[in-house]
Image: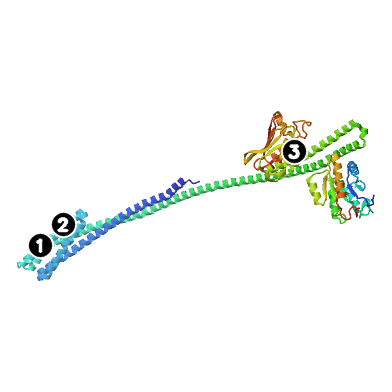
């Protein structure tokens, strides 16, 4: 990826280098241009000097004729004209001298010319003076006193001009050279600049392209990686779903098998028991005296055992049914259920006086029928095991926080030995002999099974002769009961 | 064997010979065994009621006052017998008491849904079975008014 810093560096390079090169070139051109203009200006200057010199010369050339004309005609007009031009000439010569001030030799030449003009002027003035004294003008003119000076002046002018012209030529050549140099410089530097810029741009662009390309590649490879992961996840998901579907099907099947099994059990196991019992009764009734008291006792024992077996079958079926039943979770009034269970117990043993305390307003989330079975078991046990106590007392209550309540049933009955705690909740394990207390010993296993299905668990505390307390929780609002259902196989129905 | 319809008739559908014997014994003890008719399976029950098969020629206007129906029967099951009985105009109103070992809730629900009049679970203990039989007999033969056509036409 292009880092921010690197991008700025690239940007600076891409913009900076051309800008610097351009600035350099601009400087170069300006300098060339300045020297070119300078050369041109010098040429111009020389032209001006020459022009000025010609002006002076022209003016100067008028003077001798005017002077001669004045001499010969005496016309004042010539004299005035001569003075005018003389004044102009003076001005012009001063200009010329100023113009060639940069060139000492030319300046000297100009001054010399000027002084020659001054000589000539004084000569002519002198001649005019003579004219005033009445000298014959033609005689003055014939003397040609100004001829030599004039010739020298003219030669001097020619020399001056020649010098200036050669100067002009050399300066003009210099200007041409400067122009050539400029042109060459322009071409070369533009070419160089072009090459430089081209290289720079190409390099930067290819660098950028490479960066973007690599960025794109990395993004693509990441996208590819993501796509692969997603595919994997999908595969795993569908694999998982397949497995779940399989397991569910298996569970349904085994559940169905269990149901069929229980169904046959409930009918086929009971039928012979009924026959045994009935036949036994018939035997006793019809052959009462023949079989005697011992015989009757044996038959009674036979029948008692069949009743026991029938009760066992019923209990086993109940236990397995509880495991299979789908739970219908709702808010259950446990206090109300406890009241009903106790009322039922009282109606069966109306002569027993048992103090029962039920905490009011206890509610829980769970399957109403199953929770009734739990309370039925626990309260029934408490009722049973306090039957020999002088002042039996049973309590149903709760403790803990509303989202994690512990419910309990306590009694002050015969209690149990904590040494055998491990067996307490096992199915069919009894801690008291049948002679002491009637029962099959599966009530607590049922309680544990139901409570586990609700996502909770049950435990107990007790001491021999001091009563017992049975606690249970129902897990997180009992909503996880179905979890326990799936894996929990009932060992007693195998 | 057809019966002269002076005594209220009970049709007992029971496949188990031991149970049959015990039921008869129980009914006898309660003095209501006179009109007892026994069939051994579901098919025989329908033959009897509709006068077909082995009972061809029976006067089918003479119907039992109550049918004691076990559910676990060979050939045709008890619930199927019940369904056929309720489907036919002849026997639609016939009182049927399901007398069975099963206390599976699904059986009970299905039985009532198919139109059984009563569902009684046979206890294992014979004493209790006798008592149950007595109560059933008393109720259906003495206390209950049978629909017209079932049992005796008029009672004296």
What is the x, y in percent for residue B134?
A: 87, 44
Asked if marks 3 and 1 fall on the same chain, the answer is: yes
Dot 2: chain letter: A
Mark 3 vs 1, N-terminal side: 1
What is the x, y in percent for residue A282?
A: 90, 38
Tag on residue A112? Answer: 2
Give the mark toward the camera: 3 or 2: 3
What is the x, y in percent for residue B101?
A: 83, 43
The answer, for residue B54, to whether it is visible in the render is yes
The residue closer to the viewer here, A386 or A421, is: A386
The answer, for residue A64, to whether it is visible in the render is no
Mark 2 vs 1, N-terminal side: 2
The residue closer to the viewer here, A333 or A139, is: A333
What is the x, y in percent for residue A189?
A: 38, 52
Q: Is residue A11 left or right of residue B149?
A: left
**Number of residues whose C-alpha sits closer than 10 Å to that of mark 3, classed few (under 14), some (14–19) or many (20 or more):** some
State the SS at label 3. Answer: loop
State the SS at label 1. Answer: helix
Q: Quadrant of the C terminus of chain A?
A: top right
Dot 1: chain letter: A
* Residue for badge 3: A490
* Residue for badge 1: A123
């Amino acid at each position: 990826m292009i880092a921010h810093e690197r991008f700025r560096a690239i940007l600076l390079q891409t913009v900076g280098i051309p800008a610097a090169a351009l600035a350099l070139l601009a400087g170069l051109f300006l300098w060339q241009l300045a020297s070119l203009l300078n050369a041109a200006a010098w040429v111009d200057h020389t032209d001006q000097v020459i022009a000025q010199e010609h002006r002076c010369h022209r003016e100067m050339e008028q003077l001798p004729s005017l002077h001669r004309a004045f001499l010969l005609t005496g016309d004042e007009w010539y004299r005035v004209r001569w003075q005018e031009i003389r004044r102009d000439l003076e001005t012009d010569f001063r200009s010329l001298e100023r113009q060639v001030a940069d060139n000492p030799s030319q300046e000297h030449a100009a001054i010399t010319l000027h002084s020659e003009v001054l000589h000539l002027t004084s000569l002519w003035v002198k001649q005019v003076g003579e004219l005033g004294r009445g000298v014959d003008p033609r005689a003055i003119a014939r003397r040609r006193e100004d001829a030599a000076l004039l010739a020298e002046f003219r030669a001097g002018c020619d020399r001056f001009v020649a010098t200036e012209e050669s100067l002009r030529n050399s300066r003009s050549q210099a200007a041409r050279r400067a122009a050539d140099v400029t042109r060459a410089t322009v071409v070369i530097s533009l070419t160089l600049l072009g090459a430089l810029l081209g290289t720079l741009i190409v390099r930067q662009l290819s660098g950028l392209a490479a960066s973007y390309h690599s960025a794109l590649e990395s993004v693509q490879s990441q996208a590819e990686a993501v796509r692969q992961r997603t595919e994997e996840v999908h595969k795993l998901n569908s694999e998982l779903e397949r497995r779940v579907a399989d397991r569910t099907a298996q569970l349904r099947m085994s559940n169905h098998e269990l149901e069929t099994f229980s169904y046959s059990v409930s009918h086929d196991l009971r039928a012979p028991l009924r026959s045994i019992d009935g036949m036994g009764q018939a035997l006793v009734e019809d052959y009462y005296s023949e079989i005697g008291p011992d015989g009757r006792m044996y038959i009674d024992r036979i029948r008692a055992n069949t009743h026991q077996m029938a009760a066992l079958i019923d209990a086993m079926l109940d236990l397995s049914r509880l495991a299979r039943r789908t739970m219908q979770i709702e808010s259950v009034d446990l206090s109300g259920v406890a009241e009903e269970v106790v009322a039922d117990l009282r109606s069966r043993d109306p002569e027993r006086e048992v103090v029962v305390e039920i905490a009011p307003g206890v509610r829980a989330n769970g399957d109403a029928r199953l929770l009734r079975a739990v309370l039925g078991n626990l309260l029934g046990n408490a009722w049973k095991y306090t039957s020999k106590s002088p002042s039996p007392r049973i309590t149903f209550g709760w403790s803990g926080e509303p989202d994690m309540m512990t419910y309990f049933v306590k009694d002050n009955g015969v209690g149990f030995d904590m040494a055998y705690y491990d067996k307490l909740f096992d199915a069919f394990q009894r801690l008291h002999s049948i002679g002491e207390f009637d029962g099959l010993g599966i009530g607590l296993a049922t309680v544990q099974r139901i409570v586990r299905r609700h996502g909770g668990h049950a435990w107990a505390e007790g001491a021999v002769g001091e009563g017992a307390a049975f606690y249970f929780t129902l897990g997180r609002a009992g909503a996880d009961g179905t979890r326990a259902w799936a894996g929990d196989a009932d060992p007693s129905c195998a | 064997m057809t019966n002269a319809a002076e005594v209220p008739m009970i049709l007992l559908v029971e496949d188990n010979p031991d149970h049959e014997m015990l039921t008869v014994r129980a009914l006898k003890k309660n003095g209501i065994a006179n009109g007892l008719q026994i069939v051994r399976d579901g098919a025989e029950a329908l033959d009897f009621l509709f006068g077909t098969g082995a009972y061809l020629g029976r006067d089918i206007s003479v119907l039992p006052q109550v049918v004691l129906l076990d559910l676990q029967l060979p050939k045709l099951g008890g619930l199927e017998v019940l369904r056929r009985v309720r489907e036919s105009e002849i026997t639609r109103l016939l009182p049927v008491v399901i007398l069975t070992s099963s206390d599976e809730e699904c059986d009970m629900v299905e039985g009532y849904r198919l139109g059984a009049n009563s569902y009684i679970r046979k206890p294992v203990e014979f004493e209790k079975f006798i008592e149950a039989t007595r109560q059933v007999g008393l109720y259906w033969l003495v206390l209950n008014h049978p629909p017209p056509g079932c049992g005796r036409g008029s009672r004296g």
